[in-house]
Amino acid sequence: MEKESEVNSDDELFSLLQSSGDHHSYFPGYDINNIVTEYSKYGIFKVKDANTELGRSKLYLEFVCTLKHLSDACTIHEYMRFLYDKDRTNMLKNVNFSRSDRFEDNAKHYEVLIHRRPYHLIGKCTLREVDGPVSMGSANSDNLSMRSVYSAVISSGILDVLPSLGYKMMKQHNVVSQVFHINYGSHNYVQVSLYRYYDLEKELFPGTLLTEIRCFGNSEIEFYKNLTNTFAKLLYKFVQF
């Protein structure tokens, strides 16, 4: 009897995406035939008085005012975020998960975003295929995370497909973010994002914002280190990087 050939889960997922008729490019600069490299530097903003609501904090209001002066535009996003990684406890029998990089923190993983805001994305679903650190703790010594990302808008049915291909949902949160766009359309385009995380309707870290400085491109990594560090220095009064 002829031996049945092994199936690679990533190849199977890619085939499903290619055959899907309802996905298209979402982010500016993203294309179904291209992979974009993201560089991110993370920090934490905290209100000084734990009993003060974020919107009433003078430090927060000054922080946002500073970002508005630096940026060209600000957009508000809300989405349910699902993080999928390889299921290491229940491997599918006929799927090839033998490569060692599947078991490292830098392994390929998937983010699924079900959008609630802005209005033109309500109900849409973005799949982000990420090669790079799963967590902030995976950043290098310069606190700079580098990821290769493929992004497409597809059917929310992908939430049922990923588990069947050997991926396990690791996290699920509702996320609200303010995204400040700086130098939009240029080679030194930067996004500064302020994230708030919720478990259902309850905020997980009141008075605290995960702050991300993100840039994109294929220049030398030193360029992005300098670019993110420049904005980190401008925000040192507000954020601990």
Image (spheres, helix red, strand yellow):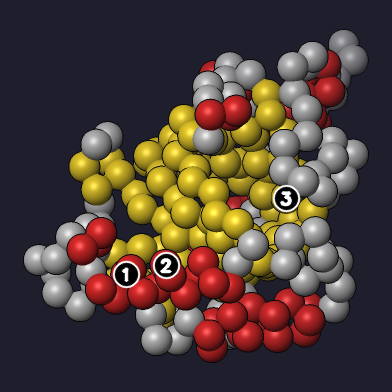
For the residues labelled 1 and 3, say whether their Cβ atoms are less than 8 Å apart.
no
- Left-right relation of 20 to 166: right
Tell me the element at label 1. Answer: helix
Q: In which quarter of the image is the N terminus?
A: top right
Residue at figure coordinates x 82%, y 48% from the top left: 29
Q: How crowded is mark 1: few (under 14 residues within 10 Å), some or many (20 or more)?
A: many
Q: Can residue 186 be seen in this view?
A: yes
Mark 1 and mark 3: Cα distance apart in space: 31 Å
Q: Are marks 1 and 2 in contact (CB under 8 Å)?
A: yes
Residue 96 seen anywhere in this rendered image of the structure: no
Which amino acid lies under the numbered mark 1 shown in the image of this protein?
A: Tyr
Give percent across and percent down for residue 150: 75, 44
Is 101 or 171 nearer to us in this picture? 171
The residue wearing badge 3 is 149
Determine crowd level at label 3: few under 14, some 14-19, many 20+ residues with C-alpha closer than 10 A: many
> Would you place residue 65 above or below residue 1 in this image?
below
Q: Where is residue 197 in the image (x, y as percent from the top left)?
A: 34, 49
Looking at the image, tell me whether mark 3 or mark 2 is earlier in sequence order: 2
Q: How far apart are marks 1 and 2 (CA)?
A: 6 Å
Mark 1 or 3, closer to the camera: 1
At x 21% / y 42%, what residue is drawn? 202
> Considering the numbered disc 3 on the image, is that residue within a helix, a strand or a loop?
strand
Residue depicted at 69% across the width and 29% down the height: 153
Q: Which amino acid does label 3 sit on?
A: Val
Which label sits in the foreground, 3 or 2?
2
Q: How far apart are marks 3 and 2 (CA)?
A: 28 Å
Quarter of the figure with residue 78: top left
- Local SS, label 2: helix
Give the image location of residue 217, x and y in percent: 81, 64
Which of the numbered marks, if any, corresponds to residue 64? 2
Residue 60 numbered tag: 1
Q: Nearer the viewer, residue 224 or 90?
A: 224
